[in-house]
Amino acid sequence: MCGNNMSAPLPAIVPAAKKATAAVIFLHGLGDTGHGWAEAFAGIRSPHVKYICPHAPVMPVSLNMNMAMPSWFDIIGLSPDAQEDEAGIKQAAENVKSLVEQEVRNGIPSHRIILGGFSQGGALALYTALTTQQKLAGVLALSCWLPLRTTLPQGSINCVNKDIPILQCHGDCDPLVPLMFGSLTSERLKTMLNPANITFKTYSSMMHSSCIEEMTDAKQFIDKHLPPVD
């Protein structure tokens, strides 16, 4: 049994209220499931958008004394120079690309799909968007960082998503993924992609969590980049 497959439970889905012409695939954080985020998106839904919140496979996590918990890949440490699970991150990105492919087969083109995530899930969403051949509508990156940044090109990258809109959000009191990681990630993304399309928002007194103001900003970002087509 491969520790990093997504044959795990089926994703939590908020179906479109009418015909789905766009989708948001949102990846939860370490130790969580997709259910809470599906509820959050149900509260800000747009009628033509389908929200897909998959559940990470359960695996031992080095950071948490090898306790088994839902995790997209192993996390060894949270400092900027900590060793990273390169094979696990790359495999997880392939699994996310398969989820996008599944929606394309369901009739939603990839350029009508926003990839998003919180913390570890946001890190995976950013890495996937930078390494996929699928043209995406945007990335919603909450309280996260850019993984495997030393393996990514220095300077601008000539990828299919070089002009992708990214909304990065971070609490200024985050004790787990410090605000500094978020701002360094944003600066790095601006050197790789079109900087005009990268927005970094911070939220006063917010810790490693979400807030109503952030979800309102997320809704505006989704509505702007996934407008109704009919």
Image: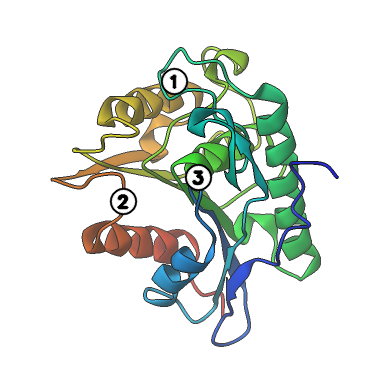
Query: Callout 3, which amino acid?
Result: Leu
Q: Residue under circle 2?
A: 209
Query: Callout 2, which amino acid?
Result: Ser
Residue at the spot x=42%, y=17% of the render?
80
Q: In which quarter of the image is the C terminus?
A: bottom right
Q: Is mark 3 on a helix, strand or loop?
A: loop
Q: Quadrant of the N terminus?
A: top right
**Mark number for residue 191?**
1
Which x, y percent locates residue 4?
74, 42
Assess disc 1: are there few (<14), some (14-19) or many (≥20) residues with their C-alpha within 10 Å of its C-alpha.
Answer: some
Query: What distance separates the C-alpha of mark 3 from that of mark 2?
Result: 12 Å
Q: Nearer the viewer, mark 1 or mark 3?
A: 3
Which x, y percent locates residue 212?
24, 64
Residue at the spot x=50%, y=34% of the render?
64
Residue at the spot x=62%, y=77% of the render?
20
**Mark number for residue 30?**
3
Cβ atoms at labels 3 and 2 below 8 Å apart: no
Q: Nearer the viewer, mark 3 or mark 2?
A: 3
Q: What element carries label 2?
A: loop
